[in-house]
Image (cartoon, rainbow, N blue to C red):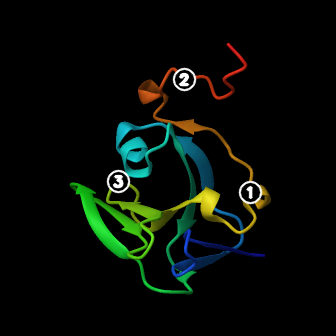
Amino acid sequence: MTLTGHCLCGACRFAFDGLPKWTGHCHCESCRRATASMMTTFAGVADGAWRWTGATPATYRSSPGVTRHFCPTCGSQLAFRSARWPGETHFHAALLDDPAQIEIEGNLHTEERLSWPLDPDQP
């Protein structure tokens, strides 16, 4: 099984073989600010099991030991790498061509989670 994904404009594309090592919704402030959303969902993939298949993304260091990959054309956040998790790259799961192919295993950094309800019709 090969999973594929791309940025908003389609220039930057990626693929990885098999299911990710792990998946999760990240609630940390850094990821919220990077994506302008209440959380972001990652799929952690072992280095060597993934590849860029379109334009090479731009990168920036958002904090010590952390590199974020983004499309230089449309600005979509694509992936995250950290010295804290060597040997793997965390892809933004919502960019997958078929995000339903993976199941989300849990939540990360819940101590930084916003109190906003996921469903505004639910308390």
The residue sitting at 55% across, 70% down in the picture is: 7
Task: Tell us which disc is closer to us: 1 or 3.
Answer: 1
4 and 11: which is toward the camera: 11
Q: Residue 84's mark?
A: 3
Q: Position of residue 35 (x, y in %)?
A: 44, 50
What whole-number distance in Å separates the C-alpha atoms at marks 2 and 3? 29 Å
Residue corresponding to mark 1: 102
Query: Is 67 positioned to the left or the right of 53 in the image?
Result: left
Quadrant housing residue 123: top right
Residue that lies at the very extreme toward the top in this rendered image: 123
Label located before the other in sequence (1 or 3):
3
Q: Position of residue 60 (x, y in %)?
A: 27, 66
Vertical comparison of 74 with 105: above or below? below
Vertical comparison of 108 with 8: above or below? above
The residue sitting at 50% across, 37% down in the picture is: 38
Quadrant housing residue 13: bottom right
Residue 103 in sight? yes
